[in-house]
Amino acid sequence: MVRSFLGGAFANTAFSLLAPDGDTRLSGSGRGPNQVLKPGRRGPGSPEADDSLVIEELANLARRFRPKGDTNEQTLQDFHTFRQALNVASADQRLLLFVISPETSQSKVESTLRPVMADSSVIGRFHVDFADQNTDKDWDENIQRSKNQAGYFIIRAGQFGQSGSVMDHLPLTASGDQVKTALLEANREFAETEERKDYGDHVSLGRRERIYFENEMPYGEDRDGDGVIDHGAIIRQGGKGKGKGKGKGR
Amino acid sequence: MKIASALIILSILLPPSLSEAQRSGGSKGGVRPSEIGAGIQPIGAESIMWYTTWDTALTEAARSNRPIFFMAAAATCSGISGVF
């Protein structure tokens, strides 16, 4: 999919605007919005590259569609794996609500959670992941204070998103209000005690500690679109990495 | 109109907020980790609510008839997790 947005090449970012059918393209495609949308293409520093103009273009495009449906019925977020969810929660510095539910209760749990996650005091402040029986069996291997049982787990991810701790646990019988109260209380504590990461310091520390995250996506880029990751070119460009992650692209 | 509520944001890993270096595009030849700094969004504050899988984003786009802001990005930097 990424290659389809980059003319056959593969790079660490790709961007496009799509119609609700997920197929019709509403814009060109490229590495990011400032490269693709008209106001951003004038380059950094120019008045035309001002974020507000990019936002205005997005708003104009959105006005072409009439939103429908109740926001309290919005689709819940989910991740492919708990491992990825924890990594993203760490990167975004948000708490993760991890839900372990038997299949028979899934529908009821989702009905409880939808209005909670759409609430104005909650939306955009948390990530949500539902446990997958196959990929998440060992989810609590590196999680402190975990209980491998059904319920709602409010999890604080560690610095590198490969460990974490449970801040609160509620049974699946908890009401929406109870879940919301627990989320807001945990978020208040999180906000008071978490420091915003500095990107450069984080990467430097990761290199020193030889942090490495195995990913299904290949590391590196295929800029010439020949189907092969250009490891050599990336190593020459970067050349600062150590250990397993040496010289590989983001 | 709030953009985040007008579009379905699908991002395989969009940063929560942009630092000055990110917004300006950084130095010539691309942004280096040391140029990015820290995000400006306060911890715990409302930020973009985004979908992290194609299936959930497409379901929500169809349900709400909102267009999709598609952004893909690696979940690591040089294989180092906990940042993107």
Image (cartoon, coloured by chain):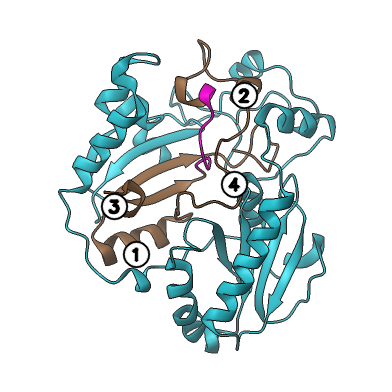
Q: Nearer the viewer, mark 3 or mark 1?
A: 3
Distance from label 2 to label 1 (Cα)? 36 Å
Alpha carbons under labels 3 and 4: distance apart: 21 Å
Q: Quadrant of the C terminus of chain A?
A: top right
Front residue (pair A229, A202) = A202
Q: Does residue A135 show up? A: no
Residue range corresponding to the magenta coloring: B14-21
Above or below, A148 against A204 in this view is below
What residue appears at the point 67 percent right and 57 percent down from the top-left corner? A83
Q: Which chain is indicated by disc 1?
A: B
CA–CA distance in space, label 2 to label 4: 28 Å
Q: Which residue is mark 2?
A: A231
Q: Which residue is mark 1?
A: B59
> Dot 2 lies on which element?
helix
Q: Identify by letter the chain in cyan.
A: A
For mark 3, give the secondary structure.
helix
Q: Pointer 3: what residue?
A: B6
Give the Cα distance between marks 3 and 1: 15 Å
Q: Which residue is mark 4?
A: A92
Q: Quick check: is B17 in the magenta stretch?
A: yes
Discs 4/1, front? 4
Q: Amino acid at mark 1?
A: Thr
Q: What amino acid does circle 4 point to?
A: Asp
Chain given the colour brown:
B
| Magenta span contains residue A197 | no
